[in-house]
Image: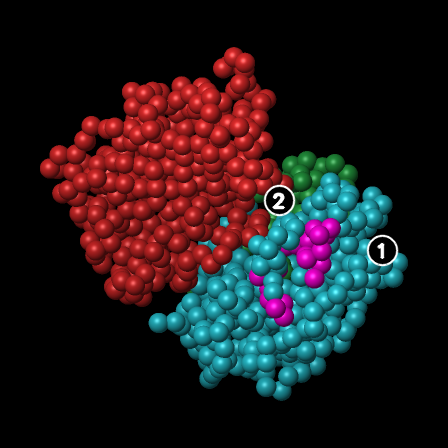
Chain colours: A cyan, B green, C red
Amino acid sequence: MRYMDEYRNPELGRKLLGKIEETLRKFPTKIAVMEVCGTHTMSIARAGIGRLLAGKVGLLSGPGCPVCVTPNDYMDRAVAWARCKDVIIATFGDMMKVPGSTSNLYREKVAGAQIAIVYSPLEAIGIAEACPSRKVIFLAIGFETTAPTIAATIKCAREKNLKNFFIHCGHKLVPPAMRALVNDPELRIDGFICPGHVSAIIGSHPYEFIAREYYIPCVITGFEPLDILEAVWMIVNQISRGNHATVEIQYTRAVKPAGNPNALSLMNEVFEPVDSIWRGLGTIPESGLIIQESYADFDAVKRMPVAVEETREHPACICGMILRGVRLPVDCPLFRTMCNPENPIGPCMVSSEGACAAYLKYENR
Amino acid sequence: MCLAVPMKIVKLTGTDAVVELGGVQRHINLALLSDSELKIGDYVIVHAGFAIQKLDNADAEERLKLLQEMLELL
Amino acid sequence: MGEAEIIKSGNQITLAHGSGGRLMHNLIRELFVKRFSNKFLDRMSDSAVLANPLNDEYDLCFTTDSYVVDPLFFPGGNIGSLAVCGTINDMAVEGATPLFLSCGFIIEEGLDIHILEEIADAMAKTAREAGVNIVTGDLKVVEKGHADKVFINTSGVGRRPKRLKLGVEFIRAGDKVLINGAFGEHGIAVLSARGNFELNMDIHSDCAPLHGIIAEILSASDGIHFMRDPTRGGIATTLNEIVAGTSSGITIDEASLPLKEETRAACEILGFDPLYLANEGKVIIVASESGAEKILDIMRRNPLGKDSRIIGKVTPEHAGKVVMKTLLGGHRIIDMLTGEQLPRIC
């Protein structure tokens, strides 16, 4: 498959690993590189890159997947709507097992809720058109990669004059979360692998403050094994050269410095930034999106009032600290005993490659 | 949040396209690339049924070639 | 009302069809017995009386499975072909020759008779081609909403040579792991038939009876230690089942996994992992190191095994775990499937 298989070439991979090792020989300590995108976490796990670099590079998985960052109150509201007889919840598959305070969508489906799993938000429009007597609420989560697609979907709903289609907006923005991460005094990161598809939309400028103010190298990275290895090499080279940290683009085939201005303007037309709660990180200023007043007709929160249970977080869950890389899964009192893949409490266990689920797989003897 | 794949355009119909990867085809929406010049044979990055960026073939090939050359000097 | 009219296509199954009366008898005779016809079934007695196929050389093999697949029809098969192949394969992987099948139908009121006819056609064809007789059956009709269109149970009886040494206890470190061809297709075919995600692809279920190819390798080699068909949960789940709780692990080699390009592509687009997709025409074989190449050779000569590969080996390391050596040379622990695989954006 073109523009994929070439970046899985084992021989080039081995040579890149060799180059990384060679440059790292001069380094006194292990370097810590964090990626902030669940897709990167998956790619790294799938290729087994973590262990290949284990000697000198620690790959940290930051708060980068919708599963990890969507707070309980968003899910509680989704569950409340799911229990309404005239509502169809349309969602990406990722959300089915994300925990709410007392339930999740998977359990609601088993209990009879109408939940449609889709690949594209446009399928939800199709469902709304096919079921005029139902209210279709689409769970819009994801970062800047997905937000423009939802903006386009909302505009499509407007063009079709749909009255039974709504969006439960839970989009979050990456650069503000990265600022919160680097502000954390407990955190020690030597380099960032920046999300390639988010950057295809937002470009490279939004990360410059990290290099300029915090002196941390950033490399915007693709998702194939060679992309990730090349990015690690680029980070290692930046550190090795000892010059000013910069933002580089490894994923040049898909990312331009200016991103996708068309997609950005669609986003800005439909959404506006708002302070947002990230699971485990708390409230981060201007880090989420809400639907602008001009498109309020499609805002599920405004147009579909529903009684939501009181949001409760599990008091002993330390996912937040694990997501920030300052604690290990084994430090959590719930790990393995009360919180496991069959019965996950926190997001780090829900995602199959989340820090805790992965730890259980690899370390469990 | 970034699962997206490069797919080849096999049909163009204004705001939509049909793209293909490994023999699998899907219709996708081009709203995010409405100001791009696209033609059949171009590759686009597809996420959730939308094209989010046009793949720069020339850059991809050039960069891979450079990487290979650099690694040969090992 | 003439018998032919009762089961004319376009008519629907009603509760009356399950009531045990003339309507039910006509349905059974016209729809099933005529298609499955054999000397046992044609008698339409309450039980099939079968001559004892065993002698001192054989043990009896007995299995059962129920089929509830949705949708009923998918590229490459339907619930009927699945119901025959699945139960045949459960016997085949034990080294048994499948001989007789029973079939029980639980039908939701309102099901179009034409759908039942197609299902029965598929079952008759599959059984005939496999050389297996459907000798007895049952039919019940339940109220609308109390079943999802149709559920089928098939039980199977076969005979298995006593001399065969097959089982987890015969697996040794150094044994090779083989598969008879590209995997994941059934899972994707069912998905595409559900119409979800609007992908356009040419992928067919691999649904097929495996007793023929298995008989060929068993007669040619003593080296087969264990076999299993990787159905729900995919090859990942089956490989884990093999080593769970034992002192052995399995290492598989990503580079040697046979996959069709369309399967790979569909998985990349939706975010699926083909290791966890269901199969209905695949067998995982664990064979001695010395015998593996010969077994591979024989499998490749059979149409159901032309893409056979050695995909890994049994190892004394990482006991109880399945580890994949990735294309890149890294290692990835392959867990069992937890829950259902769903398309993702992350």
Q: Give percent across and percent down for residue A157.
A: 80, 48
Question: Residue tagged by mark 2?
Answer: C197
Q: Give percent across and percent down for residue C85.
A: 37, 35
| SS for dot 2 | helix
Range of the magenta residues? A80-102
Mark 1, chain letter?
A
Q: Give percent across and percent down for residue C261.
A: 49, 42
With A339 as the anchor, is C319 left or right in this view?
left
Q: Is residue C279 visible?
A: yes
Compare residues C140 and A163 and report the one nearer the observer: C140
Q: How far is disc 2 from disc 1 in space, using C-alphas?
A: 27 Å
Q: Residue at x 54, y 45 (%)?
A: C266
| SS for dot 1 | helix
**The residue under label 2 is which amino acid type?**
Phe
Q: Residue furthest bottom?
A: A185
**The residue under label 1 is which amino acid type?**
Asp
Compare residues C302 and A158 and report the one nearer the observer: A158
Question: Residue tagged by mark 1?
Answer: A297
Q: Residue at x 71, y 58 (%)?
A: A81
Q: Residue furthest right?
A: A294
With A311 as the anchor, is A342 left or right in this view?
left
